[in-house]
Image: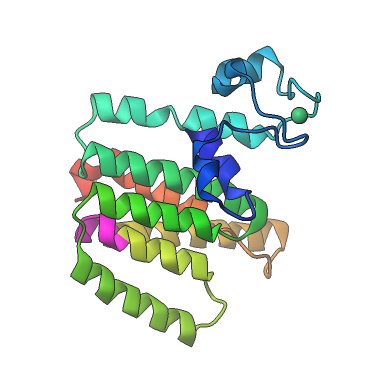
């Protein structure tokens, strides 16, 4: 599922039949054989290369697939503050968006639309909170133009719909706390003051932090 959605991020024009097709090779566009669809196993067997044209696969495939295993433990051994389906949905999409954001400093609009669609289908979210938060976030975006990417504004708006109010507030707080520390370290240690930082990985870390420590914080 991770590899499929990750590949979907890189599709330029989304046609409906793409959702029904089997994944293709990133380089020669050949349709993948059944064995190649089993993610971690096929990556190890082929030592990180494509079977069809022997190109090196992006390391983000294996990183993403390994991280995608984490919800199996959380949903089994932990009491979550949100229901399992909502947690899985947010976790998977934030993971994909994090990797895409690290690579490109943007977010794929068509996958955001799929995220919204799945979100409204899976959960009865907080519509009024979402409208209120989305308005505030858009105001912030237009006043402090370029302080934050528009993709991040959209993502926070969707999270305000999916997450309980307290958890959403804490997610924003923790996100900016760790992103702030990271930016500060970059500035002091690496002297990179003007470097743009992808925000979604920090949203992803904040979300997981709150999922793990929910009992003591919320
Ligand atoms: Zn190939």
Q: Is residue 76 rendered magenta in the image?
A: no
Front residue of 18 and 47: 18
Percent from the top left, x then y, of residue 128? 19, 71
Residue 70 to residue 179: above or below: above
Whether residue 218 is situated above or below residue 91 in the rendered picture: below
What residue is at 35 percent from the left and 43 percent from the top? 89
Residue 145 rendering spot, x and y as whole percentages: 54, 82
Of residues 99 and 206, the one drawn nearer to the viewer in this rendering: 99
Question: 79 or 217: which is nearer to us?
Answer: 79
- Total marks shown come to 0
Q: Quadrant of ligand 1?
A: top right
Way the structure is coloured: rainbow
Q: Is residue 178 visible in the rendered structure shown here?
A: no
**Which residue is more in the foreground, 198 or 128?**
128
Residue lying furthest top: 45
Residue 30 visible (yes or no): yes
Q: What span is colored magenta in the figure? A: 160-169
Residue at image location 43% in from the left, 66% down from the top: 154
The structure residue drawn at horizontal position 18% and vertical position 54%, both measured from the top left corner, is 124
Question: Which residue corresponds to the image point at 23% horizontal and 30% vertical from the top-left?
Answer: 78
Assess whether residue 163 is covered by the magenta stretch.
yes
Residue 39 lies in what quarter of the image? top right
Residue 133 higher or lower than 4, as above or below: below
Q: Give the residue at the far bottom of this rendering.
A: 143
Residue 136, image x, y percentages: 33, 79
Q: Main secondary structure of the magenta part?
A: helix
Residue 102 % position (x, y): 62, 51
Query: Which quadrant of the view contains residue 21?
Result: top right
């Amino acid at each position: 599922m991770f590899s499929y959605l990750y590949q979907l991020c890189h599709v330029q024009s989304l046609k409906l039949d793409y959702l029904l097709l089997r994944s293709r090779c990133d380089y020669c566009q050949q349709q993948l054989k059944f064995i190649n669809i089993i993610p971690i196993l096929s990556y190890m067997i082929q030592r990180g290369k494509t079977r069809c044209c022997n190109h090196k696969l992006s390391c983000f495939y294996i990183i993403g697939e390994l991280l995608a295993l984490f919800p199996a433990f959380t949903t089994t051994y932990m009491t979550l503050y949100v229901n399992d389906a909502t947690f899985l949905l947010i976790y998977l999409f934030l993971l994909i968006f994090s990797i895409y954001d690290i690579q490109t400093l943007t977010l794929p609009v068509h996958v955001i639309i799929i995220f919204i669609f799945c979100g409204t289908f899976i959960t009865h979210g907080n519509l009024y909170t979402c409208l209120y938060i989305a308005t505030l976030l858009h105001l912030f975006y237009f006043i402090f133009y370029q302080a934050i990417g528009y993709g991040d504004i959209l993502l926070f708006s969707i999270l305000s719909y999916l997450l309980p109010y307290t958890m959403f507030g804490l997610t924003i707080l923790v996100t900016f706390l760790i992103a702030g520390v990271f930016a500060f370290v970059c500035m002091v240690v690496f002297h990179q003051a003007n470097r743009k930082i992808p925000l979604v990985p920090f949203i992803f870390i904040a979300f997981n932090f709150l999922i793990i420590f929910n009992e003591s914080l919320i």
